[in-house]
Image (cartoon, rainbow, N blue to C red):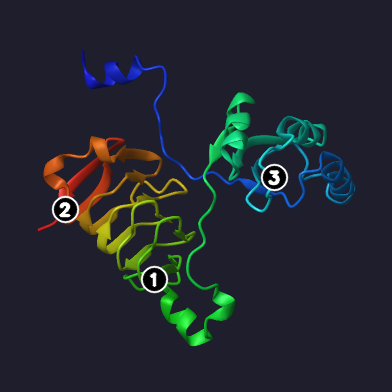
Amino acid sequence: MSLKADRASLAFSFKGGMLPMTVMELTSADPERIREQLAGKLSQSPAFFQHTPVVLSVERLEEPHLALERICAVCRAHKLLPVAVRGGTDPVKQSAWALGLGWFPPQEVRGRSLESVPASEAEAADAPVAPVDSPTAESPRPMGRIYRGTVRSGQQVSAQEGDLVVIGAVNAGAEVLAAGSVHVYGALRGRALAGIHGNATAGIYCRELHAELLSVAGNYKRLEDIDPRLLGAAVEVHLSDDQLAIAALD
């Protein structure tokens, strides 16, 4: 049987992707208070409440047990669709799963906020970068982004336009993503996603490959799918016939 026939016989395939998602950060576990505020918001912005998927963040709540089912019911009554919960204790996680929701670990915040960093230091650590080729008036290219330093576990660094260049390492549990290509001048141990808006010509380049996940335009490979001979090597990753191809860099 040919490869095309094999693909045609598949009922589905898994693809990585970055979808826009609204996070509803709860500062109260009282369903009635949530109901009152949602009612006010609905009158102000009715277009927003049109079956919008939301992630319920409970990281700022200290209650070990939440009336999660009631909170979800309040959201649905106001045309919001809870799809997952972020943070909370193990009982919260179990409740989310019992309700058919996903669960995400709490978002880890590391380092100083940009508000506390001198302007010159913040700009040096995270500055935009022009594309390598000079843009012309006929074919302007989007600006990219340079990030200097280690991307630590729990952090996410993104370039919504152009390429992302990380001058440092990407730790396990961290995530880097770009509309264009991702370049890591160090060890890549976390997740790297290139072409997040569908750019199939994007690629991933790193000096030392140990990635948990690699994705280009929604096509992905996990660590266990990568040829062990390429682990620890400098590689480039690109799409070839809708499949990820990983090759060592000379």
* Residue 51 can be seen, yes or no: no
Q: Report crowding for label 2: few under 14, some 14 to 19, many 20 or more residues within 10 A (C-alpha).
A: some
Q: Disc 3 vs disc 2: Cβ atoms closer than 8 Å? A: no
- The percent coordinates of residue 202 (x first, y second) are 34, 52
- Sooner in the amino-acid sequence: mark 3 or mark 2: 3
Name which residue lies at 35% across and 57% down. 181
Amino acid at dot 2: Gly
Mark closer to the observer (2, 1): 2
Amino acid at dot 3: Glu
Using residue 41 as the reference point, say whether residue 160 is left or right of it.
left
Q: Is mark 1 on a helix, strand or loop?
A: strand
For disc 3, the marked residue is: 63
Q: Is mark 2 on a helix, strand or loop?
A: loop
For disc 1, the marked residue is: 146
- Sooner in the amino-acid sequence: mark 3 or mark 1: 3
Amino acid at dot 1: Ile
For disc 2, the marked residue is: 232
Q: Separation of disc 3 and disc 2 at Cα?
A: 44 Å
- The percent coordinates of residue 74 (x first, y second) are 80, 35
Q: Report crowding for label 1: few under 14, some 14 to 19, many 20 or more residues within 10 A (C-alpha).
A: many
Q: Separation of disc 2 and disc 1 at Cα?
A: 23 Å
Among the 4 quarters of the image, the one containing residue 136: bottom left
Name which residue lies at 82% across and 32% down. 77
Q: In this view, does 125 lie above or below 110?
A: below
Among the 4 quarters of the image, the one containing residue 80: top right
* Residue 74 can be seen, yes or no: yes
Mark closer to the observer (3, 1): 3
- The percent coordinates of residue 36 (x first, y second) are 89, 45
- The percent coordinates of residue 109 (x first, y second) are 52, 61
